[in-house]
Amino acid sequence: MKTTIQEQDGNLVAIFEGRLDTAAAPQCEQDLKPLNDCAGHDIVLDCTALDYISSSGLRLFLGVLKNAKPKGSHVFITGMNADLRNVFTMTGFINLFEFK
Amino acid sequence: MSLSKRLNTSVAVRTTFIALLTSSLILLLLALWQSHQVRKVVVEEVQRQASRSMDNAINTIIDRLSSVETAVETASGYADVFAKDEKSCYQLLERLINHNADISAVTLLYRDQYFPNQGSYYAPTVYREFGGKNILTDEIGGPDYDFCYLETDSNWIYTNKLRHGYWCLPYLDSMSTKRPMVTYSVPLYEPDSTIYAVLCADIDLNWVKKIMDDSKPYPYSRVSVVSRDQQFICHPDSSCILGVNVFEHARKKGGQKSIELIRRMLRWERGSDTMDTNLFEGMDADDFADELSEYNKDGWNSGPVIVYFAPVGRVQWSVSFTIPESKILEGPNDLRNNMLMIFLFTLLMTSIVLYVVIHRELRPLKDLADSTHELAKGRFDVPLPIIRHNDEIGHLRQAFSDMQTSLSHYVDELQATTAQKASMESELNVASSIQMSMLPKIFPPYPERDDLEIYGQLTPAKAVGGDIYDFYIRDEKLFFCIGDVSGKGVPAALVMVMTRALFRTISAHEASPERVLAQMNETLSEQNESNMFVTLFIGVLDLPTGRLRCSNAGHDVPLIVGEQVAFMQVDSNIPLGVMEWKYTAQEMNVKPQTTIFLYTDGVTEAEDASHGQFGEQRMHEVACQALADGHYNPDALLKRMQEAVHQFVDGAEQSDDLTMLGIQYTKEQRAVCLQREITLTNDVQTIPQLAAFVDEVCEALNFDMSKSMQMNLALEEAVVNVMSYAYPAGTQGDIHIEAQANDVRLKFTITDNGVPFDPTAKEDIDTTLSAEERPIGGLGIFLVREMMDSINYERVNGQNVLTLRKRL
């Protein structure tokens, strides 16, 4: 599992690669820390290369959203495959995030 | 209308008739008695009157005769002065006749040749001119006229013989007047005591008749006088006077009784007798002429008469009054007739008045009856007749009025109640359908399952019943219950609904039946103000294993129909809602093909017409028969039982809800085509190993990427849950995961030795909440449920066993 934070066009972009399972979640949480300081920027979670996400990953996503929202930042998800999107649909997360 | 019919239909006629009859009878008896009394009194009075009259007449006659006697005797005393001379003797005679009005003629009969110049018999006489006032003199003696001396009974001869004054027998005047006469004669003596003349005073006996007539008690009385020579001196028929012998007369007229009467009279007795015929009939006097016609009418000539008779001693006569009985009783009879007339009139008037009054008084009753007929037709506002009198009829009318009012109220009330009842009934019907809709009623309920067959039915005794059964599957466990709420009807139904709701709510996160019962009991006891209680049997059948845990709250023990028929071995505990209780649970293994038959007392206590009960014995026999026939799947068993109960009660009214539930465990063992296992430590860093394991299994089963990811997700979430909760932080333990697949489904069994932890008891998360409201945790089990067909938790032998299944 590899998580990269980039700045593109004024947005903070997090790029996920591999499996975001419970085992990977603590490291990923560390990697996502820069997103805490997101004032003035929208956040894009790039899931193009994400193969798998468990509830631990969903919790991280929710954490990012809960942090960004009070600061007026939008959180976008991009490039998510159908299976993952299915999980989002199931859990109602699809209503919480904006998709690009 | 005939009288008898009127008597039956009219009170007025009947009352009048009875009154008329009664008073007629009484008055008739009274009239008879009174008539009898009056007759007696009248007869006595007549007798007294007749007696008095007779005494009067007799005394008068005697007085008159005495005065004549005295006059003649006195004259005889000084006769010597005048009688010795043939001329001066006239002075004596004239003096005598002038001084005595009763004397009609006075004669001196001289002895033969007393006055030689006068021939053989000299008889100077002075007499009253008949019909005139002149006193005439005559000389009736002489050779050609000497009857006075020749007849044996002549005054001369008798007087000579007797030598004292003497009344001769009555005779008819020899002259043309033919008057009845009687003569008193006194002898005149010479100094030598030889009789030289007889002084005779003739008396016209018509005065006797006159005296008698004057003294007769009643104008219609007949008088008669009989002389001692058996002649009538006085008789209504003048031809009889001195003409017939009284005995002859009596013999001719009246026979023996009359003769006897005459005998008594001639013995100078005094008395009275009743004769059938009138001896003394006949009319001679002109003064009877008027009465004649009148009395003949009344039968003077027929019918009995009463004869009163008494003697006149001096002259040896017998006087008599004859009075026809009919005349005596005329008064009483008239009185009787008048009284009868008056009675009849009174009765008639009374009857008319009675009839009119009763008829008028009872008219309101007829009006009341008419009103009541109207009332009976349902016209409650019909006016009742006005009755002013405050009498019995007035009271009756008041009572009818009250009845009308209360009837009207009652009917209004009844209508309201009926309407209310109808609306209540329709509400009850709705309630009943709501209640029934709460029970599972689509059978078979799980057509996709091959391990379970269920059939249930509830026949309420009333529209809404207090019986309950329910079942549902959660996490590969069949939760089922059957129960009976005390009482019937709406209250029981309400408690039943509450019971069912509690069962569903509590068992949604509690898989131990005894704990479900305990919690239900707590709630029901708390709020149990109406002291209702519920018997309930709860079973939890673990479908993968066939393990059954059950707990009973005082309900009828279910039958197990498997290899044999037997009652389940469970503690009965106590019904719910009574008091706090620690419920116990029993556990058993249900072999495939076994049917659990649950029922309420509506089955065992179904009553026939003679209150005999169906009983557990019969139920057991029916189940045995079903088992023997091989038809003991729930559907067949329930139908058989139902039929047996129906046959038993034979049309008697169903007294209690009839509820049955049959559950057959039909799991088949299938051949295992895949078996893998792995053991992980409770460290999330072992998750990749799990992922590899799951991928391997999925690959073996040719799952696509998408399905593999779902399996991964489910397994990771389940295992992480176990790691997090079964092994509290800091504890070490293993988690054993076994994957097993047959040709139908894939099964993961996750076993650990941690603290008891049932992840299925967690409540589902709400996926519709906003980001701010969503809790961070709780997603894991939710995802497992979503990904797998079933999740099933069991605590077995101190181990948590979580089973996940997915259809291939």
Image (cartoon, coloured by chain):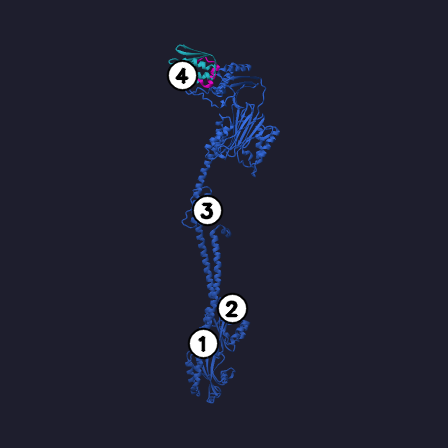
Q: What SS does tag 2 mark? A: loop
Q: Disc 1 vs disc 3: Cβ atoms closer than 8 Å?
A: no
As measured in the structure, the alpha-carbon distance from the residue carrying label 1 to the one carrying label 2 is 29 Å
Q: Residue B369 carries which label?
A: 3
Chain that is blue in the image:
B
Badge 4 is on which residue? A67
User: Nearer the observer, disc 4 or disc 2?
Assistant: 4
- Residue B35: image location, x then y, percent: 48, 64
As measured in the structure, the alpha-carbon distance from the residue carrying label 4 to the one carrying label 3 is 97 Å
Badge 2 is on which residue? B304
The rendered magenta stretch, by its main secondary structure, is classed as helix
As measured in the structure, the alpha-carbon distance from the residue carrying label 4 to the one carrying label 2 is 159 Å
Label 1 vs 3, first from the N-terminus:
1
As measured in the structure, the alpha-carbon distance from the residue carrying label 1 to the one carrying label 3 is 83 Å
Question: Which quarter of the picture shows residue B767?
Answer: top left
Is disc 1 in the same subunit as disc 4?
Answer: no
As measured in the structure, the alpha-carbon distance from the residue carrying label 1 to the one carrying label 4 is 175 Å
Chain that is cyan in the image:
A
Q: Assess whether residue B624 is covered by the magenta stretch.
A: no
Give the residue displayed 51% in from the left and 52% down from the top. Answer: B4
- Between B789 and B277, the one lying in front of the other is B789
Q: Which chain is mark 3 on?
A: B
Badge 1 is on which residue? B59
Q: Assess whether residue A86 is covered by the magenta stretch.
A: yes
Q: Which amino acid does label 3 sit on?
A: Ala
